[in-house]
Image: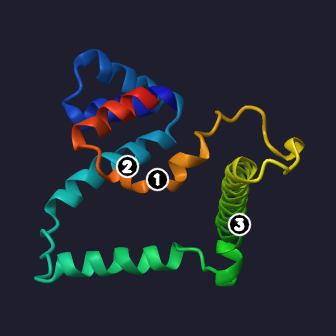
Amino acid sequence: ALVYDDLLKKRSQRKLNAQEQQRLRELFAAAPELKARWAEDVAIPQIIQKLPQPEISSNFTSQVLRKIEFDQRARAPAITAPLWRRFWPRTVAYSSLAFALCVGAVYYQQLAARTELAENAATVTTVARLVQPQIPRMAIPTDLPPMPPVDIWVNFEAIRRLPDELDTELMLALE
C-alpha cells in the first residue's frame, strides 16, 4: 500500500516514467483489485477539474464573519459565578491595604501629637521653673538647653529697638 500511495502521488504531480510504470504493473499483477482502485483514483482529479467553478456570493465576506462571530459566542464560556465572587479576592486585598494605611496614619498622627505634647510640656516646665524656682527639678528633662534669664522675657522694648541686621547675627550666634 505504501508503494501504491507513492506512485499515486507521483502520478498526480507528473507522468510516471518507465521504471515507475513497470512497478505499477507488478503491483496490479500481485493485487488485481488495485487496478480498479487506480482507475478511480486517477479519474477523480480529472472529473473535479471538469466541474464548473462555483460562484461566490456577493455577501460572502459578511456571511463568513457572521459565522465566525456565532462560533465564538457559542464557544465562549458562560459566566455563572455572581459578580461579587469574581471580585471578592481583589476587594479583600484592597480593603486590607486601605485599612492598614489608615491604621498606620492614625498611629503616626498620635505619635506626632504625643511627641509635640511632650516637647511643649518640657518647654512650659522649663519656663515655669525659671519664673518659680520652687517647681521640682525631676519633671524637667535634662537634655534641654538652659533658658535665658527672666529679665529677657520681660524687656520686649530692648528687643524691638535692635536693628534688623543684628537679627541675622543673633540667629547665627544662637545656632
Residue at 85%, 47% in the rendered image: 139
Q: Are marks 1 and 2 in contact (CB under 8 Å)?
A: yes
- Residue under label 2, please give it: 158
104 w.r.t. 90: above or below: above
60 w.r.t. 53: above or below: below
* Mark closest to the chain's N terminus, 3 or 2: 3
* Mark closest to the chain's N terminus, 3 or 1: 3
Numbered disc total: 3
Amino acid on which the number 3 mark rests in the picture: Phe
Amino acid on which the number 2 mark rests in the picture: Ala
Q: What element carries label 1?
A: loop
Q: Nearer the viewer, mark 3 or mark 2?
A: 2
Please provide percent x and percent y for residue 31. 53, 34
Amino acid on which the number 1 mark rests in the picture: Asn
- Residue under label 1, please give it: 155
Q: In this view, does 34 lie to the left or right of 135?
A: left
